[in-house]
Image (spheres, rainbow, N blue to C red):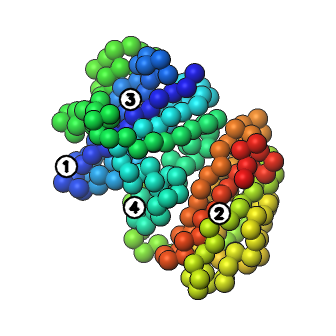
Amino acid sequence: MTLIIHVDGGSRGNPGPAGAGVVICDESGRRLHEGAYFLQRLTNNEAEYHALIRALERAARLGPAPVKIRSDSELLVRQLTGDYRVKSQRLAPLVQKAQLLLLRIPRWSIEHVPRELNRRADELANLAMDRGADLIVFDADGGAAEARVPAASPPPRADEDRAPQPPAELEPASPPAYVRVAVKSAPSLGACPAEGCGFSSVQIGNTLPAGLCVYAAHALLPTLLAIRGTEPAEADAIPTMTVRCSRNGCDAVFHVSPAGSSNGT
């Protein structure tokens, strides 16, 4: 079974009271979940990511299945596919959380669709803002409902001036013992403080490679740790992830996957 997920988020005030809409169906169009989630005070872009995170968390309860995600947010789609850099410190932790949830999905894709093809998710996001509370309109576990559930707590805020953390030794974890990191796009000329990555493709185990700058390490570590912590039986299903260096102007892009995975680079 392939899950088709439509997500939308919005804010009245940007930032202001925000809501997220989630629609999950199977490939035949059978409805599995419709949820409206109140998010309190957020920007439009933050609400879009919260909608995706809510959808992925609900999809995980349906068991391992391929997922096709549809969103009318071009920013969200292009950031997750690595076409756009994540510049906002408020969005960065949400992007990382979404990427970690995507690691648990056997196969996934994400597509930008026009707003008219995402209408139901948009209606649900507005319903959440109108009600000021979460509302589960339909769920396969409980049928049709209008049962209220507690409103979402305010999301964590990233410090605007948070400095990149220095590279650190990765803690031992269950297999996969190594993670493959390949350079998709090299740093811009003169933009890397380490004067380049020093590799085109490398397997990373318990230590980071010599010469990797702190900015690239800061960007790569969450994904490296997530893959290292994956159950051995799930490792081969992890898709290749795209990670951008966190240093402004660098433009380095990495492909990250379990070493030896059929999804590897």
Label 1 CA crowd tier, 10 Å (few <14, some 14–19, many 20+):
some
As measured in the structure, the alpha-carbon distance from the residue carrying label 3 to the one carrying label 2 is: 34 Å
Q: Amino acid at mark 2?
A: Lys
Residue 112 is drawn in which quadrant? top left
Label 3 or label 2, whichever lies nearer to me, is 2
Crowding near the residue tagged with mark 3, few <14, some 14–19, many ≥20 C-alpha atoms within 10 Å: many
How busy is the neighbourhood of tag 2: few (under 14 within 10 Å), some, or many (20 plus)?
some
Q: Amino acid at mark 3?
A: Val
- For the point 34% across and 14% down, the residue is 144
The residue identified by callout 4 is 90
Secondary element at tag 3? strand
Mark 4 near mark 3, Cβ–Cβ under 8 Å? Answer: no
42 or 150: nearer the eye?
42
Q: Which mark is residue 23?
A: 3
Q: Secondary structure at mark 1?
A: loop
**Which residue lies under the disc numbered 2?**
184
Q: Which residue is mark 1?
A: 12
- Dot 4 and dot 1 residues touching (CB under 8 Å): no
Between marks 4 and 3 in the image, the one whose residue lies nearer the viewer: 3
Q: Is residue 37 left or right of residue 259?
A: left
Q: Amino acid at mark 4?
A: Arg
From mark 4 to mark 1, how far is it between C-alphas?
Answer: 18 Å
Q: Which mark is residue 40?
A: none
> What amino acid type is highlighted by mark number 1?
Arg
**Residue 105: horizontal and vertical position, in percent?**
60, 37
Mark 3 or 1: in front is 3
| Residue drawn where x is 57% and y is 47% of the image | 100
Residue in front for this viewpoint, 161 or 49: 49
Examine the rendered structure and indicate whether residue 30 appears above or below residue 229.
Answer: above
Identity of the residue drawn at 67% across and 56% down: 256
